[in-house]
Amino acid sequence: MTAPERTGFAGKIDSYFEITERGSNIGREIRGGLTTFFTMAYIVVLNPLIIGTVADGEGNFLGGGDAPNLALVAAATALVAGILSIIMGVWARFPLAMAAGLGINAFLAYSIASREGMSWPEAMGFVVIEGIVVFILVLTNFRKAVFAAVPNFLKQAIAVGIGLFLAFIGLYDAGIVRSGAGTPTQFGDGGYITTWPMLVFIIGLFTAIVLMVKKVRGALLISIIVATVAAVIIEAVAGLGASVDNPNGWALVVPVLPDAIVSAPDFSLVGQVDLFGGFTSLPVLTALLLIFSLLITDFFDTMGTMTAVGAEAGLNDENGNPPRTQQVLLVDSIGAAAGGLGSVSSNTSYIESAAGVGDGARTGLASIVTGIAFLLSTFLTPLYALVPFEAATPVLVVVGFLMVSQVAGIDWKDYRIAIPAFLTFILMPFGYSISAGIGVGFISYVLLQLVSGGARKVHPLMWGTAGAFVVYFASGLFL
């Protein structure tokens, strides 16, 4: 049976995106695109709370000044996500949306921008450089070679470590885990929930957990909204204020309703980039290793993401490859550099796109709808400055859980695999450094292969990277 003849503008849209051929229609694509937006819209709230609340090595926050500029970061986050999702839809014609990547934004904030002497524009310059490198690797097909160089279990361990790191940040920033009396950390205040903000965190966390278990779409965004509403009510009644004035107050953002809900977005954050300044603020080797760590952190998700989304949509070929793979990878690599230029951290493809696919999306038209929704959300940035830490950080814990689930794919019976993996992911939260976990994991893997007769199995790129990390860690003895 042949497809019906397509005429007019709708027919051209159908033909270009192959909507009918893929078993969909324009209505399903619109619905699927909106579903994807609502499942990943939390990033517009969460990204500002990760990168917008960390002062750089000079004491300034992203966007400048000695106070967070959350609305500014939210507007730029939504802008870049919207533009890239539309490009993905138009060029790659694949139902995959993009936004600032969780994990890499934490690495950027806590392991790069906050280093002594570094500034946020310099940190964003590193992101742009990393994105350009990835783009070149895609054009030359070298990305697949690098992808093959790092053993899969180390990729999984990196994801697990970042998940633990994000969960720890969420718990600590909300005050659920804090410095203890006689112990490095403790739960709550002496083991108890003693403040209203802590209760808001608990409300947000269990709302997210329950909704996820019940498979409610948009669970993370809904949990942020529920916890924020609770926080606004509590602040209106109790008038807690900020923790700097009241030890039982809110950690950073006081949840008070803004004067206006809709306002013209401020995109002045875009373009605040110093491309090569980081090489003067840090030793060259340190700068190169940090860029490499960014690349590693950012590099490996997209192939798995697009394959999973393609499989969910029934679009992959007999070898498991999605259609227009090269175009998808090129747009994704552009996302890294675009995120740096937009001062919102590297942007990457989101696995949440599978929610839109589950709701019927099969083509790039859905990604365009998602992108348009992100662009419209830039006019709601006053609301993003309303969300307190305690309402948003539960999502970090839940995202941490989702990332830690990859631990199941590691062979714990083979010590040559298990020990490097273990060191990789425990050192990230305990050492408060993603790059430290990656470096020690790479070094221990190469070392254990060397002493156990498996040196030939180690890719030359892994030898070079492990050696660079050895020099990097040892440089502290001589600096």
Image (tube, rainbow, N blue to C red):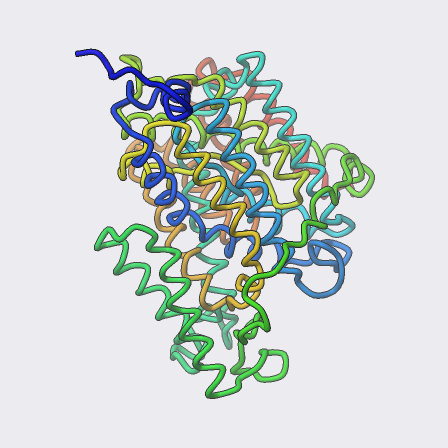
Quadrant location, the C terminus = top right
Q: Indicate the quadrant where residue 259 lies.
A: bottom right
Where residue 205 sits in the image (x, y, percent)? 35, 64
* Horizontal relation, residue 269 to residue 465: left or right: right
- Which residue is found at the position 38% from the left and 79% from the top? 192
Which residue is the extreme one toward the bottom?
238
Q: Which one is in front, 381 or 334?
A: 381
Residue 72 in view: yes
Which residue is the extreme one toward the left?
1
Q: Which one is in front, 405 or 99?
A: 99
Where residue 7 sits in the image (x, y, percent)? 36, 19
* Horizontal relation, residue 50 to residue 425: left or right: right
Where residue 208 sits in the image (x, y, percent)? 33, 59
Compared with residue 365, is residue 244 higher up or lower down, i.e. above or below?
A: below
Residue 409 in view: no
Q: Indicate the quadrant where residue 443 lies.
A: top right
Quadrant location, the N terminus = top left
- Which residue is found at the position 24% from the left and 51% from the top? 215
Compared with residue 225, is residue 143 higher up or lower down, i.e. above or below?
A: above
* Horizontal relation, residue 329 to residue 199: left or right: right
Compared with residue 383, is residue 161 higher up or lower down, i.e. above or below?
A: above
Which residue is the extreme one toward the front?
8
Compared with residue 398, is residue 247 higher up or lower down, i.e. above or below?
A: below
- Which residue is found at the position 49% from the left and 52% from the top? 429
Where residue 292 sits in the image (x, y, percent)? 62, 31
- Which residue is found at the position 63% from the left and 35% from the top? 338
Q: Which one is in front, 342 or 34?
A: 34
> What is the count of numbered marks?
0
